[in-house]
Image (cartoon, helix red, strand yellow):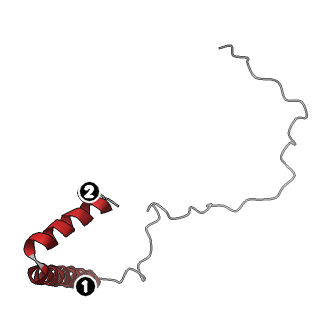
Amino acid sequence: MNFMGMGIPELGVILLVAFLVLGPGRAIDMARSAGKIMGDLRRSFGDVTSAMTVETMDQGTPTQDRTPDAQAPGVPMRAETPLEDSDDHEPPAENPEPGPEYKV
């Protein structure tokens, strides 16, 4: 795990030095306020995500009810005419003519 180019041991040393410099009471208060800030950020991102979801649902047909465009990527293509099983086709030759030889 890397955080800003630092591994776990480096982060541990930084936290230990911060604990020694600030003292136990102030270090705990700083950790508490950092936790509150992180919680507020998560709630804000959740609110934005839910607002965007509601906004896209209000703009028209829900995504489940939409029919995909025939030219859309990922839509399987269907044959326009069904394949016919007929005996009009010639069977493959047993010894086909060899193609041209290429030398490299």
Going by the image, does 62 lie left or right of 87?
left
C-alpha distance separating marks 2 and 1? 34 Å
Q: Residue furthest top?
A: 103
Residue drawn at x 85%, y 48% as measured from the top left:
88
- The foreground one among 18 and 57 is 18
Q: Give coordinates of residue 22: x percent, y percent.
A: 8, 74
Indicate whether 52 appears above or below 75.
below
- Select label 2 or label 1 by which is in front: 2
Residue bearing mark 2: 6
Circle 2 packing at 10 Å, graded few (<14), some (14-19), many (20+), is few
Amino acid type assigned to the residue bearing label 1 in the image: Ser
Q: Earlier in the sequence, mark 2 or mark 1?
A: 2
Going by the image, does 25 lie left or right of 45?
left
Indicate whether 61 appears above or below 74.
below
Task: Choose top left, top right, bottom left or bottom right for residue 1.
Answer: bottom left
Identify the disc placed on residue 88.
none
- The foreground one among 61 and 21 is 21
Residue drawn at x 66%, y 61% as measured from the top left:
81
Q: Give coordinates of residue 9: x percent, y percent.
A: 30, 61
The quadrant in which the C terminus is found is: top right
Circle 1 packing at 10 Å, graded few (<14), some (14-19), many (20+), is few
Residue bearing mark 1: 50
Circle 1 SS class: helix
Circle 2 SS class: loop
Amino acid type assigned to the residue bearing label 2 in the image: Met
